[in-house]
Image: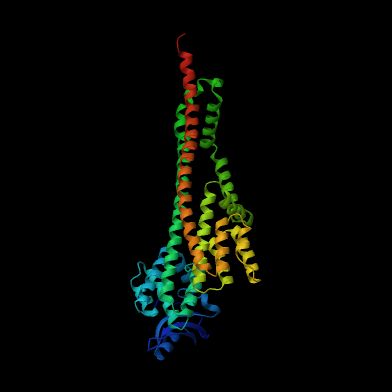
Amino acid sequence: MPAVIDPPENILHKWNYKARKSGGEMSRGVLEALTHADAVRELRRQGLAILEVQLGDAGASVGETISIKSRKNRLENAFRKDDTVSFCAQIAVMLRTGVTLKESLDTFAEQASRPIVGDLARAIRDDVCEGEDFSAALAKWPKIFPSLMISLVRAAEASGMLDEMMARVAKDLAKQRKTSRQVKGAMAYPAIMLIVAVLAVTIILTTVMPRFAPLFAMQGDKLPLPTKMLLALSDFIRFDWMYWLPGFAVLGFGIWYWMKSAMGRQAIDKAKLTFPVIGPMFRHLYVSRFTSTMATLLSAGVPLLDVVRILKDVTNNLCYNAMWKLVEERVSHGGELAPTFREFKFVPRNVAAIIAAGEKSGRLPEVLESAAQVAEEDLDVSLKSATSMVEPILIVVMGAVVGGIASAMLMPIFNMSNMIRPH
């Protein structure tokens, strides 16, 4: 146990402790003692195996070992999405083979790929051993386990199908992870091309152009206008950095601040759905996510109103949030889903028609699963189409920029050759 600096003496302090009884059960509580050593001594006298003792009153900031909040932040920041998928998949396999939940968590903690992953599994195991529901223990880590997963686990605990539900959660999370990677991969290519273009132009203007400056100076006012503009831009980048560097910093901060504002988020989220090339890609992405999630939650028996509230986190778009708010209001008054979906252009008409058919037939989860498969196929097509369209556009733009710079540099040379050519 790490050393602890005791608070002022001669004052009783409350110590939060976590220990294990002789039978293996977890025990948590609060103990009054003068010092940390006195608290440990009293717990050992009671026959408890001490796991943690922390100062719990107003003086907790004096000599506290590791604060619960900082430990939680450390775990949440270090836990990856792939770790969440692995956690769900391995727990599902062990539960399916008859291993108890406590033993499954212990085994996962021992075999974890990284110590931080094992620490989280042990924390969940401790909560479960103290009598908390598995869903409640997971809900303490909202940055790691999404609300979708918590709702599914809670429904599975009521139905006794935790192993099947954990397997389904792992499958859905892996599918979402794959889709996100595909979208990020499609967006990464143009970003890399843009960075390369900016670097190429910068190198030309700061290293190549100055070598030609003495040659161009010989022509004086006879220089072509494009060449004059290029020389002025080169000098501005090289010698006036004290002006443009702070300007770019202010501009970058302004853009960042605008993106974080409600107006900026609204504009960006709307652009994702309406902008050429990327618009269809994001529309199919959101439709795939919410139809698949709705199908999973409704199949698990989660109430429709709870499903709608969860979908706000799944789509994570302000335009969709407005739609879910309207859906929630109408469903709470006994309305249907399909009429509301038809009012929003970013929901395909065929999806709204499929949902309407599912509501009338009473087979909404099955119908939504089919709609999700169609949306995933459309997403694959949109990703390939976006990639194939962006590539030639970027090549043309880069060629025009670099070609324009090269032309501006060569025009004075051609003029000089014409001047010295014998008549």
Q: How far across and down, in percent of the image, does residue 119 sit?
A: 40, 72
Tell me: residue 377, above or below residue 205: below
Tell me: residue 348, above or below residue 9: above
What's the coloring here?
rainbow
Q: Quadrant of residue 362?
A: bottom right
Q: Is residue 367 left or right of residue 112?
A: right
The residue lying at 35 percent from left, 67 percent from top is 113
Q: How far across and down, in percent of the image, does residue 322 sit?
A: 63, 61
Tell me: residue 117, above or below residue 251: below
Q: Quadrant of residue 345?
A: bottom right
Q: How far across and down, in percent of the image, does residue 227 sit?
A: 52, 27
Q: Is 257 in front, or is 313?
A: 313
Q: Quadrant of residue 196?
A: top left
Task: Assign the N terminus to one quadrant of the image.
Answer: bottom left
The residue lying at 53 percent from left, 58 percent from top is 286
Q: Is 81 in front, or is 156?
A: 156
Whether residue 63 is visible, yes or no, is no
Q: How far across and down, in percent of the image, does residue 144 sit?
A: 47, 67
Tell me: residue 95, above or below residue 319: below
Q: Residue furthest bottom?
A: 46
Whether residue 405 is visible, yes or no, is yes
Q: How many marks?
A: 0
Q: Is 12 in front, or is 202?
A: 202
Q: Residue furthest top?
A: 423
